[in-house]
Amino acid sequence: MPVFAGLRVSAFLAWKSIERGSRGTLALTIMIIALIFVNLVFLPSIISGVVETFNTQSIDFDLGNLVIEPREGSQYLDGVAGLQKKVERIPGVVGTSPRITVGVTYFYRGRNAASTLYGITPEDERSVTRIADYMTAGEFLSSGDTDAIVMGATLAGSEGEEVGGLPSLQGVGVGDSVEVAYPNGATRTYQVKGIFKTQSFGVDTAAFVTSREMSGVLGLDNQASIILVKTAVNGREEEYKTELLSYGIQEEILTFREKSGGFVDQAIQSFNIINAISTLVSLIIAIVVVFIVIFINTVNRRRQIGILKAIGIDQQIIINSYVLQVLFITAVGALVGIGLNAGVTTYLTAYPLVFPGGPVYPDVEASAILRSIASLFAVSVVAGYIPAWQIVREDILSAIRG
Amino acid sequence: MIVAENLTRVYTMGRVEVRALGGVSLEVAKGEFVGIMGASGSGKSTLLHILGLLDRPTSGRVMIDGTDVLALSDHRRTLFRLNRLGYVFQDYALIGELTALENVYLTSLVRGASKAEYLERSAEILRRVGLGDRMDHRQSELSGGEQQRVAIARALVNNPSILLADEPCANLDSQTSRSILDLFARLNEDLDQTIVMVSHEDWHKEYFCRIVTLRDGLIEEMVECRKEPHPHGEA
Ligand SMILES: Nc1ncnc2c1ncn2[C@@H]1O[C@H](COP(=O)(O)OP(=O)(O)OP(=O)(O)O)[C@@H](O)[C@H]1O
Ligand SMILES: [Mg+2]
């Protein structure tokens, strides 16, 4: 008997069974498969959304793509202007921004807050981070500013509001004067030139003055704590790092990921464990559901299966007809699932979940969809095959007698 | 040619043994039309099941056209049923999900027939059993006698060389029964089909070449009835 004829019969039986079987059961099964599909795709999409948000926030507001730091034992990078020139000549580097980083205490109307103050070169900073585009009041620094400061919205705070644990001056506005106590004992009074809000909380609790000003206070010359490097594309930090090393940069080079430390990697790892557990549970549910559906289906059709065998239809054709039903149910379920998932994604893109670090948009990767479809199919076929195979082996006459 | 030697079939139900067949030997020549009669519970269906490769005897041997069919694998037995046998079940055994027409053409589909071919053949045989206007009905929409005729059509559709029919007229009025038996007789004569048919009705005897009567799982008597072609066959 030709294989094709066998498949044709399996398809015929499968289709008649779907067409003339219970509509309700069919719809319910498809719905369950669809929900399992959504579950398989949703969590990974949120996790990769979180990672994506974190990456963009880090690159755009905090660190750029790469950072250059002094080697072990030195506090500052020296000959910063020369180093900057050298790095900016490397293909793929689109900007560098040296920063002097110092922990200070801010005083304002009898309130104080300890946080970070950065000394930057405004044009350089603009070529790397996008903080200057996120001013909620006033303006960003210009190169000549010496008595001006721009401040993150969290640090500036608002009147009468205590932000649990975060440094806040509770209501600093543009034009106000803020006193800054440097660790070397110097104090300076700066006028607030602007306030920015980036949603990246490490940045929003800090403030910026020009490095010209800060160098004067700290007695530095052509020095910086760190140089941020912006590259033409995101996501290829490792390659650029190798590139920089090959151009003979002697200082320590870190990708933004390395710089932010194990924290994110750990978080991602934990997310991945949660994701693996959730995937496993979903797939087990899928196995059980498909198994039960096909089991009930075949048990209810014992007599029919016996008759099919009696009139000369091979077991394999009968089993295949159930496998085809499962494939059909899974395919429709996956399609409905893709639809549902698109709905959820659209909703969450319009009304994103807010995490520390900013809004998180579900990031549905094609590979996640394909993987989910593939695992659903694999699982369903197995879960459909086994009960069909069990029932089909039964003795013909006992099956027909029911 | 069917050769059954010393068939026994014992059902074990707990500690009770039911001896449905107690040693039946029977030869049916190619083209013979054999009637099997006997009281209810005498083992007629049991014998037919074994000849139809639906059941295995507890002991004994069955050769069909020289093949020891008990030695075949399940897969081969399935193919044998598909290609060589037509079987009319005592309880019809239709597929409830399928229409009359679909029930009839299903095996042609398995045999790889083209759509035009199996549709035409199935419709034709359904018309011959008088169901030309019931083709799209499902089992639940057919009377007992109509279901029985669908079962007959299904058994006949591939012109099997051996037809085994278990009381195929049990639910039919005498006129319809006669037309079915005429159809059998014609296939028997025109196509040289071997037919083994279980029956309760005395008047069916006029169609049989030979009548085998069972009693308590044994052959009680075997009677040759006629040698001449049956007049109804020419109808
Ligand atoms: N599956 C079974 N389990 C136990 N006993 C059975 C089974 N099938 C049949 N029998 C017994 O075997 C004997 C023969 O049954 P069989 O069905 O062959 O009778 P029959 O001659 O076809 O009867 P009828 O004319 O009523 O159809 C009966 O006594 C019956 O009870
Ligand atoms: Mg019987």
Image (tube, coloured by chain):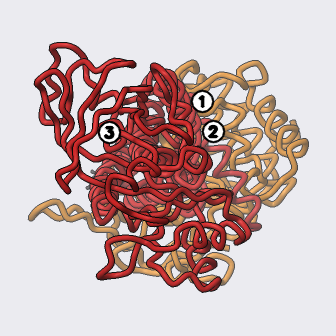
Chain colours: A red, B orange
Q: Chain of mark 2?
A: A
Q: Is residue A268 above or below residue B121?
A: below
Q: Residues within 10 Å of mark 2 (few under 14, many from 20)?
A: some
Residue at the spot 67% in from the left edge and 63% down from the top edge? A93
* Residue B216 visible to the viewer: no
Nearest the eye: B188 or B103: B103
Name the mark nearer the viewer: 3 or 1: 3
Answer with the quarter of the image where residue B83 lies: bottom right
Whether label 2 touches label 1, CB < 8 Å:
yes
Q: Residue A190 in the image: x percent, y percent?
A: 34, 32
Q: Residue B69: where, in percent of width, then height?
A: 56, 78
Secondary structure type for disc 1: helix
Counting residues from the N terminus, which is met first, the one under dot 3 or under dot 2? 2
Judging by the rendered image, the residue that carries numbered circle 1 is: A19
Q: Position of residue A304 (x, y in %)?
A: 48, 44
Chain letter of the residue beneath label 1 in the structure image: A
Q: Which residue is mark 3?
A: A201
> Relative to A75, is A235 above or below?
above
What SS does tag 2 mark?
helix
Residue drawn at x 62%, y 48% is A127
Mark 2 belongs to which amino acid?
Trp
Q: Please tell me which residue is depicted at 84% across the width and 35% down the height of the picture.
A: B124
Report the side of B44 relative to A17 (left or right).
Answer: left
Q: Quadrant of residue B184?
A: top right
The amino acid sitting under disc 1 is: Glu
Which residue bears the numbered disc 2?
A15
Q: Chain of mark 3?
A: A
Sequence-wise first label, 3 or 1:
1
Q: CA distance from mark 3 to mark 2?
A: 57 Å
Pointer 3 and pointer 2: residues touching (CB < 8 Å)?
no
Neighbourhood count class around disc 1 (C-alpha, 10 Å): few under 14, some 14–19, many 20 upward? few
